[in-house]
Amino acid sequence: MKLSPTAVLTIDSPIGPITLIARGEKLIGVELGKKAKTEGTSQVFALAKKQFDDYFAGKLVRFNLPIEVSGTEFQKSVWREIAKLGVGKTLSYGEIAAKIGKPLASRAVGAAVGSNPTPLIVGCHRVLGSTGRITGFTGGKGIKTKAWLLNHEQIEFLP
């Protein structure tokens, strides 16, 4: 069976629809709060659905899915740091900047976090301001979705 080069599947979740986009057997995108027409097929969808179900059931510590993302080397370095975080763990923008060797790049880190193509898998919702405040979120219903995810993971934060 030949797989289409790009496949799309929307799954239901407690935060609304989650659309998975795959190329071959790797996820290349995750869109929160968006429903899309199913196109093509990919074996990664079954694994992704299981892991998302486990995450929302409180049984998953870290996503382990094959992803292939496009971005600058700087963005990818930010996303790699975020991907190291397990469920219930957080970092600030400044901490990420320091970890990637760019201690003065907090704002650029914020831009990279906001352009994360695979939210939840690369848990950008776990990145908070230095005071523990939610500073933004573009997925689903924005801050409301981020707050739901943080509460789900029992992470304390300031609104």
Image (cartoon, helix red, strand yellow):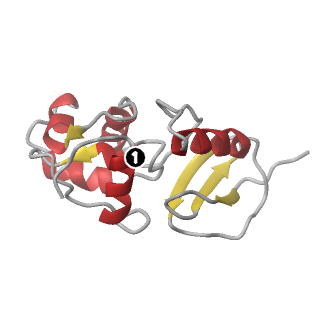
The residue shown at (59%, 35%) is 66
Provide residue 70's location: percent of width, then percent of height: 47, 49
| Mark 1, secondary structure of its residue | helix
Figure quadrant of residue 64: top right
Residue 35 lies in what quarter of the image?
bottom right
Task: Identify the residue shown where x is 21% and y is 36%.
Answer: 96
Residue 80: percent from left, percent from top? 37, 34
Name the outermost residue toward the right.
1
Residue 126 is situated, as x and y percent measured from the top left of the image, at 31, 43
Residue lying at 16% horizontally and 35% vertically, measured from the top left: 95
Q: Residue at x 49, y 60 (%)?
A: 15
- Dividing the image into 4 quarters, which one contains the N terminus? top right
- Horizontal placement of 145 versus 64: left or right? left
Instruction: Confirm whether residue 48 shows in the render.
Output: yes
Q: Write down the quadrant of residue 154 in the picture.
A: top left
The amino acid marked with disc number 1 is: His
Near-viewer residue (115 or 19):
19
Residue 122 image position (x, y, % from top left): 43, 42
Circle 1 packing at 10 Å, graded few (<14), some (14-19), many (20+), is some
Q: Is residue 32 above or below residue 94?
A: below
Q: Quadrant of the C terminus?
A: bottom left
Image position of 120 (left or right of 39) = left
Of residues 70 and 93, which is closer to you in this image? 93
Q: Does 122 sit left or right of 135 as displayed? A: right
In the picture of the structure, the residue carrying the numbered disc 1 is 152
* 5 left or right of 18 in image: right
In the rendered image of this protein, does residue 35 appear above or below residue 66?
A: below
Residue 115 visible here? no
- When the figure is inspected, residue 63 is found, relative to residue 11, above or below; the finding is above
